[in-house]
Amino acid sequence: MPNRTRMIAGNWKMNNDVPAAKKLAEELVAAVPTSDAVEVVVCPPTIDLACTSHKLAGSAIKLGGQNVYWEEKGAYTGETSTGMLKSVNAEYCIIGHSERRDYFHETDEDVNKKARALMAAGITPISCCGESLEVREAGKHVEFVVDQIKKDTEGLEITDPSKYVIAYEPIWAIGTGKTATADDAQEVCGAIRKTLVEIFGQETADGIRVLYGGSAKPENIAGFLEKEDVDGALVGGASLVAESFAAMVEKAAE
Ligand code: 13P
């Protein structure tokens, strides 16, 4: 039986200025239970990474970025390098979020380059995929996500499968209150796993965490976690309230 440590990751998106980030980080340290059964990550905006890192120091909560650029340094105004993420002890970084794909035109090729840069730097990518409502209604969601996975992982060498994470986030379920059912999540996460087996072989595929994201909250997390190929959640709105995020971690630790 595959033995994957569950993961609950919070994506703060563009919320919390520095004072608010410090306050939330303090509350999280106090509220989030520590358990070997679940890895906990928070991904604040870039401006908050340093202060959040400082507040999380000594706790079991790990830090992640929300974006990265693949060049090491230079004239790339507004971008953040892997070295900069490492300098604040970020161990994870979200890439390919649907908001970045939609609003900032991030492509699968970009996502692949970002994954390569992160992995070369020893930072774990949390690589997002997911279909729009239109694709889902056309019944093409599995095909669409499998294609994203193939492109996003192209040529990657995964030596430690615990250091590459995928998040399946159906776009129509993000921030809408419309949650995919646990069966919807399993259908796509199962197809992702099968694709990973084809690409990387069974052993590696068995070690890669596949998270669900999209209106995940304390009330529905348990249903997702029961599913064979769902290994945790990437949480937006509910990660901004320490109590709800902690409750989700608690459920994942059960
Ligand atoms: P919500 O949990 O707010 O729907 O956001 C999900 C998400 O996009 C996490 O990356």
Image: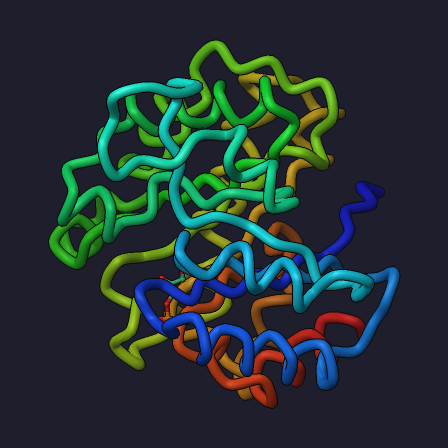
Q: Is residue 144 left or right of residue 200?
A: left
Q: Position of residue 244 (x, y in %)?
A: 56, 86
Quarter of the figure that contains the N terminus: top right
Q: How many discs appear?
A: 0
- Which residue is painted at 50% across and 68% down in the image? 182
Is 216 on the left-hand or right-hand side of 77? right
Q: Quadrant of the C terminus?
A: bottom right
Residue 238: percent from the left, percent from the top?
A: 47, 80
Residue lying at 36% horizontally and 43% vertically, measured from the top left? 129
Up-down: is 219 above or below 97? below
Image location (x, y in percent) of residue 250: 74, 79
From the viewer's perspective, is residue 42 above or below residue 116? Answer: below
Q: Quadrant of ligand 1?
A: bottom left
Q: Note whether 90 is above or below 240 in the view shown.
A: above
- Horizontal side, residue 152 vs residue 52: left or right: left
The residue lying furthest to the right in this view is: 36
Foreground residue among 70 and 191: 70
Name which quarter of the figure residue 59 lies in. Answer: bottom right
Seen from the viewer's position, the closer of residues 194 and 91 is 91
Residue at 60% from the left image edge and 23% from the top image edge: 121
In front here: 44 or 78?
A: 78
Please determine whether, in this image, residue 115 is positioned above or below residue 48.
above
Residue in view at x 60 percent, y 13 percent: 157
Q: How is the image coloured?
A: rainbow
Q: Position of residue 229 (x, y in %)?
A: 61, 50
